[in-house]
Image: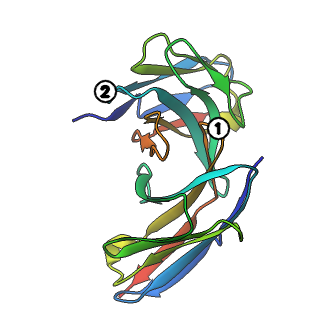
Amino acid sequence: NAGVTQTPKFRVLKTGQSMTLLCAQDMNHEYMYWYRQDPGMGLRLIHYSVGEGTTAKGEVPDGYNVSRLKKQNFLLGLESAAPSQTSVYFCASSQREEGGELFFGEGSRLTVL
Amino acid sequence: GQNIDQPTEMTATEGAIVQINCTYQTSGFNGLFWYQQHAGEAPTFLSYNVLDGLEEKGRFSSFLSRSKGYSYLLLKELQMKDSASYLCAVRAYGNNRLAFGKGNQVVVIP
């Protein structure tokens, strides 16, 4: 019973490098989200998707791109990493109905040097 | 937009009761969630309130007052494993997203 799986769990990048975080969910959820969590800032929404083929900007989208080509996968890309993107990234998914809770992945810790 | 406020940290003794407050300002309120997050782990769902009143789930209860923009999470019979951050999150109508507060760190001591 995997739920929401994120890869990789840890990554160290140099400034200017690119990378992609992969999120996969096996619960057939419509909605998927990418959050970042920084000390003292709480969880902040980067991008989200309400269905396959759709994406939308969240609270802090700059410097990130996303794609949802398949319903079960939501990719977060950093085209040119910056030290300010050092953070813990959480993917989450939820069902469509009212009160649908978010199920989170285990998180991906990214360090940009 | 949504503005969510939570106190940052509190310490409580094993076996005691602790209340964690959350105040929010949002247009078109459509539900409030509480999550628990242990250090280095993902948040996990605790409770959901959309109507005024108290929801009880074992040792945890959550209360909502929509007119006051206020919720609290009550943790009873505290255990050491309850040491965690507790996150309040609000959803607005027509909005598929949850806006999270900064979280309240609860430290349980023997």
Check disc 2 and report its element: helix, strand or loop.
loop
Chain designation of label 2: A
Where, by quadrant of the figure, is residue A113 drawn?
A: top right
Provide residue A66's location: percent of width, then percent of height: 59, 19
* Residue A113 appears in view: no
Q: Amino acid at mark 2?
A: Asp
In the rendered image, residue A110, in percent from the top left (x then y), is placed at 54, 35
Q: Nearer the viewer, residue B47 or A44?
A: B47
Q: Which residue is mark 2?
A: A26
Kind of residue at disc 1: Asn
Q: Is residue A76 above or below residue B30?
A: above
- Which element carries disc 1, helix, strand or loop? loop
User: Where does the image place residue B107, in percent across and percent down from the top left?
Assistant: 47, 77
The residue sitting at 48% across, 30% down in the picture is A11
* A42 relative to A46, above or below: below
User: Height in image: B1 above or below B106?
Assistant: above
Q: Which of the image's four quarters has the C terminus of chain B?
A: bottom left
Outermost left residue? A1
Quadrant housing residue A5: top left
* x 58%, y 62%: residue: B103
Task: Tell me which residue sits at (55%, 19%) in the image.
Answer: A19
Nearest-to-viewer mark from 1 and 2: 1
Residue to which mark 1 is pinned: B95
